[in-house]
Image: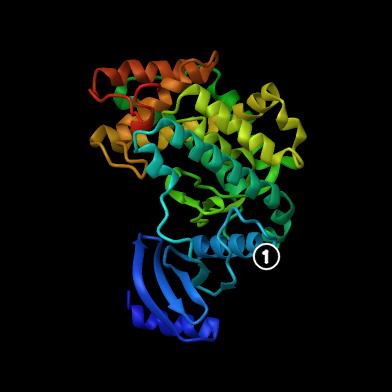
């Protein structure tokens, strides 16, 4: 990436001379650079992951920033492939807290993440029709429903190397989940799509969510389920996160304030998340382990997901137990543990 060219482009956008100071991060989807101008420091993000990802993030940040949602970076200028955002400084992320050894600090950070996500959802409920008119990215709700149907179709082939069969009843669970995903009704919102701890900055005003490449219109609980299925968090921490999220969205979805109602609404999303994880990861992991953004190995994460699902009293629970029985003899890896909760998870 040519920082001089980026500075020139940004200078034209903000109408004042800009100097590129430091590359903050580079990935397959984007490069993030700290810049400085007469207006002060700013962060410039160059999106390189393709039109769909770029359009999703541009539209989401523009709408949320204009609406005054401070759970996202203030974003005054959005171009075709360049986004200019406020500079929040060299602050830690929620993920950093999870890999420290301070359980109390990690819990506070996670509750802040949940509150910030709820704030985005509260704003996003009113903004999702505008997001749709902007044709930003693919129709996430329909795409994810289709992905779940495809996961069910390929599941027998994926499971055949470990001699596991798909139990009767999984198809009915998938059918219910597909219906809920494709037609969320009043639960439709503009959502983040990838709210892991590395995308949550601990700023001076609380947790701020970044990296909206996977933003889209989908069931609001599609974000929430990501810390219900998979992360190796203590039960009381997950419950505290759900409570923080519930308080943030209470004005928009008062029904979700009831714990039992929320858990019932989450179940089709758990089916979606669990089956997509199994169908999407197993084939690769049978060939060899991979390092994930969470900081854990893929095999650890898949075993953690299956371990959480096996307690379900339905066909998905049966499937999870069958897979665990088969994989325990193949993979000698421990379940993942965040250092912050090493003694409590």
Near-viewer residue (210 or 266): 210
Q: Residue at x 41, y 50 (%)?
A: 92
**From the viewer's perspective, is 180 left or right of 171?**
right
Point out the image quarter for the N terminus.
bottom left
Q: Residue at x 52, y 28 (%)?
A: 238
The total number of labels drawn is 1
Q: Position of residue 56 (x, y in %)?
A: 56, 60
**From the viewer's perspective, is 140 left or right of 127?**
left
- On the question of residue 269 being in view, the answer is no
Q: Residue at x 60, y 26 (%)?
A: 267
Q: Which residue is mark 1?
A: 66
Q: Secondary structure at mark 1?
A: helix
Residue 238 vertical placement versus 222 (above, below): above
Near-viewer residue (175 or 126): 126
Residue 287 vertical placement versus 13 (above, below): above
Q: Position of residue 131 (x, y in %)?
A: 67, 59
Q: Position of residue 275 (x, y in %)?
A: 48, 31
- On the question of residue 103 being in view, the answer is yes
The quarter of the displayed image where residue 76 is located = bottom right
Residue 16 vertical placement versus 323 (above, below): below
The quarter of the displayed image where residue 230 is located = top left
Residue 132 vertical placement versus 6 (above, below): above
Near-viewer residue (227 or 47): 227
């Amino acid at each position: 990436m040519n920082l001089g060219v980026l500075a020139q482009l940004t200078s034209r956008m903000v109408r004042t001379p800009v100097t590129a100071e430091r590359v903050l991060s580079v990935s397959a989807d984007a490069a993030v650079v700290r810049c400085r101008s007469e207006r002060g420091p700013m962060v410039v993000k160059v999106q390189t992951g393709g039109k769909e990802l770029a359009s999703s993030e541009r539209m989401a940040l523009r709408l949320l920033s204009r609406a005054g949602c401070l759970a996202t970076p203030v974003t005054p200028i959005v171009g075709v492939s360049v986004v200019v955002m406020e500079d929040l400084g060299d602050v830690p992320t929620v993920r950093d807290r999870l890999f420290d050894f301070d359980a109390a600090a990690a819990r506070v950070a996670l509750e802040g993440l949940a509150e910030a996500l709820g704030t985005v959802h509260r704003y996003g409920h009113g903004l999702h029709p505008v997001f749709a008119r902007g044709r930003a990215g693919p129709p996430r709700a329909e795409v994810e429903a289709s992905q779940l149907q495809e996961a069910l179709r390929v599941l027998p082939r994926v499971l055949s190397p470990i001699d596991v069969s798909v139990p009767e009843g999984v198809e009915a669970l998938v059918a219910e989940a597909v219906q809920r995903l494709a037609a969320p009704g009043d639960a439709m919102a503009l959502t983040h799509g990838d709210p892991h701890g590395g995308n949550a900055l601990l700023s001076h005003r609380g947790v701020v969510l970044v990296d909206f490449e996977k933003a889209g219109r989908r069931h609001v609980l599609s974000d929430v389920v990501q810390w219900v299925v998979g992360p190796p968090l203590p039960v009381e921490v997950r419950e505290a996160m759900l409570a923080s999220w519930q308080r943030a969205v209470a004005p928009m979805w008062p029904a979700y304030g009831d714990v039992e109602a929320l858990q019932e609404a989450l179940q089709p999303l758990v089916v979606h998340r669990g089956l997509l994880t199994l169908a999407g990861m197993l084939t690769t992991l049978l060939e060899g382990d991979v390092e994930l953004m969470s900081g854990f190995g893929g095999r650890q994460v898949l075993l953690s997901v299956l371990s959480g699902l096996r307690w379900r009293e339905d066909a998905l629970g049966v499937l999870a137990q069958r897979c665990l029985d088969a994989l325990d003899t193949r993979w000698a890896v421990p379940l993942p543990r965040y250092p912050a909760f090493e003694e409590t998870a």
